[in-house]
């Protein structure tokens, strides 16, 4: 009975929460470019009209404005939660104290068994007070006696109170309206409260966004399309969150490793340079160590000069650096990325072209890459290099680079973005090959995504020219979005009307499908499960109507 009451109370608030969250969704997700709260459009369903939706919104608002002041606030949600918790707690007291047979304020197992057996006998069942009883009977007794916190066989009023309070904390479905109201107000841009008309306007606005043909009535296709857009936003957001968590974990690991980071020492007259970026702007056609990681391509162009250069190159994502110009000036290039070939392989993934192997050091993940010299990560890494090199490094950093220009020591410091640096990240697009050298991208939406992801293009790299920390080989399927474009060109994939990719034959999934490079795939009946790793992508089997093993991003 107690569970039934709790479920009813929970259903009451959950129902309200669902509708209110649906109203929050009505706050114009496209306008705010944010995914609305979880229960989207609870009354904006197929067949709904604008008049019906606004009438429903008015009813929900009046029920939700618990203090009756005409404004929906977080306090309304807080009051709802408090009332529900109070009623559930009272029900918890009643459920236990109804077995206090001698009315002394304490409940024992014997009292519980006596009253339960009495109720069974009144209902026509023969149940003894002691001895063997049906399993359900004994389970009910054990459930009630769970409130006996000190296990002395006596349930006191204080123990009833504690058990009821713990049940409330453990049953999240009976509360949470305050959080839902807060999400709604934040979504509506009205932190101090929302009037009835403003609430109705939000619902109407969302209704019109879903009603793409403007006929004032939601069709099945319009609702499905809206739901699909929401799921896609959620998938992308979840993938971005997972990637951020992985990046933070990698940064923490690198910070720990930096305490024991040993760098080769520069010669006394060498100029010490520290270059850092999150990633390169171009994609390499050559992999390092694993097909599951996307490897970038970048250029280090060294100007003529007299002095030697001791250079440290750090990136978060793996990069093959092509050294050009006066490369004889470089006495040592120390190269590192935060990526590895796997959990059991701690070696950094990095490569270089144009320098002999004896002048390259591939550093383990012990220095954190940074995108701004004037940042906490930048300060830590610069300090570590300063300690190792016994002098201040000249620093350049950017988020994504296609080329680092290393001027001669005699030139003035070059400025970029208001910061003085001796090395400048060039925005020049180099080795661009979308138009032909590797393959043509005929899917225009994907082509635009590729332009955004790899403004430096896809660079054809000969594995034989690369010195790397791990074995080097050409990708059979390029990573990320480039691999999807390649498979489309080969006919292994086709794109359906909702932007998903249909797998038509056995393939290897592109590597590095994380964050913005993830996608949704449908595996047709009879087609073998792809090789490779899904990353943050969804691969849904048409045959089993379930995601394939290892694909946990289908929503």
Image (spheres, rainbow, N blue to C red):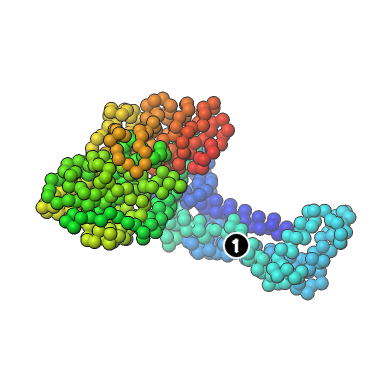
Residue 190: horizontal and vertical position, in percent?
41, 58
In this view of the protein, which residue sits in the foreground, 150 or 445? 150
| Residue at the (46%, 56%) spot, across then down | 183
Q: Quadrant of the N terminus?
A: bottom right
Is 520 on the left-hand or right-hand side of 365?
right
Q: Give the farthest residue toward the front.
A: 358
Quarter of image, res 513: top left
Residue 146 visible here = yes
Is 549 on the left-hand or right-hand side of 161?
left
- Look at mark 1 in the image and give the residue it sits on: 169
Is 279 on the left-hand or right-hand side of 26?
left
Residue 77: horizontal and vertical position, in percent?
52, 61
Residue 35 visible here = no
User: Against 488, is 239 above or below?
Assistant: below
Assign a secondary structure to mark 1. helix
User: Against 396, is 479 above or below?
Assistant: above
């Amino acid at each position: 009975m107690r569970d039934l009451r709790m479920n009813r109370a929970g259903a009451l608030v959950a129902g309200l929460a669902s509708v209110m969250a649906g109203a929050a969704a009505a706050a114009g997700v496209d306008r705010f470019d944010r995914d609305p709260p979880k229960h989207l459009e609870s009354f904006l369903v197929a067949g709904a009209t604008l008049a019906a939706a606004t009438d429903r919104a008015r009813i929900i608002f009046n029920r939700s404005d618990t203090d009756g002041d005409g404004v929906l606030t977080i306090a309304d949600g807080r009051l709802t939660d408090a009332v529900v918790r109070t009623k559930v707690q009272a029900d918890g007291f009643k459920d236990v104290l109804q077995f206090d047979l001698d009315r002394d304020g304490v409940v024992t197992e014997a009292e519980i068994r006596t009253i339960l057996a009495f109720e069974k006998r009144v209902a026509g069942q023969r149940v003894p007070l002691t001895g063997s009883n049906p399993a359900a009977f004994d389970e009910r007794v054990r459930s009630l006696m769970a409130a006996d916190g000190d296990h002395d066989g006596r349930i006191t009023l204080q123990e009833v109170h504690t058990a009821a309070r713990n049940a409330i904390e453990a049953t999240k479905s009976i509360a949470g309206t305050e959080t839902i109201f807060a999400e709604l107000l934040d979504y509506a841009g009205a932190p101090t409260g929302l009037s009835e008309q403003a609430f109705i306007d939000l619902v109407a606005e969302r209704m019109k966004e879903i009603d793409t043909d403007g006929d004032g009535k939601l069709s099945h296709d319009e609702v499905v399309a809206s739901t699909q857009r929401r799921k896609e936003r959620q998938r992308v957001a979840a993938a971005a969150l997972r990637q951020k968590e992985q990046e933070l974990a990698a940064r923490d690991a690198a910070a720990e490793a930096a305490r024991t980071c040993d760098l080769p020492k520069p010669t006394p007259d060498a100029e010490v340079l520290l270059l850092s970026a999150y990633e390169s702007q171009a994609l390499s056609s050559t992999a390092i160590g694993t097909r599951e990681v996307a490897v970038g391509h970048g250029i280090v162009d060294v100007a003529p000069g007299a002095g030697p250069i001791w250079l440290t190159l750090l990136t978060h994502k793996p990069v093959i650096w092509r050294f050009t110009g006066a490369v004889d000036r470089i006495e040592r290039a120390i190269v590192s990325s935060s990526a590895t070939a796997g959990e059991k392989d701690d070696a950094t993934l990095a490569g270089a072209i144009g320098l002999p192997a004896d002048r390259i050091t591939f550093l383990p993940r012990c220095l954190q890459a940074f995108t701004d010299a004037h940042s906490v990560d930048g300060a830590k890494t610069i300090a570590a290099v300063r300690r190792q090199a016994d002098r201040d490094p000249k620093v350049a950093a950017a988020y994504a680079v296609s080329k680092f220009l290393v001027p001669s020591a005699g030139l003035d410091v070059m400025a970029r973005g208001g910061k003085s640096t001796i090395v400048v990240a060039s925005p020049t697009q180099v080795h661009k090959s979308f138009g032909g050298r590797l393959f043509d991208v005929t899917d225009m939406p994907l082509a635009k995504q590729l332009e955004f992801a790899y403004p430096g293009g896809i660079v054809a790299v000969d594995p034989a020219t690369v010195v790397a920390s791990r074995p080097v080989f050409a990708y059979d399927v390029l990573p990320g979005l480039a691999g999807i474009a390649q498979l489309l060109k080969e006919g292994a994939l086709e794109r359906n009307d909702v932007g998903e990719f249909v797998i038509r034959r056995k393939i290897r999934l592109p590597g590095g499908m994380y964050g913005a490079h993830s996608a949704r795939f449908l595996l047709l009946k009879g087609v073998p499960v792809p090789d490779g790793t899904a990353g943050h992508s969804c691969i849904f089997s048409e045959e089993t109507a379930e995601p394939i093993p290892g694909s946990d991003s289908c929503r």
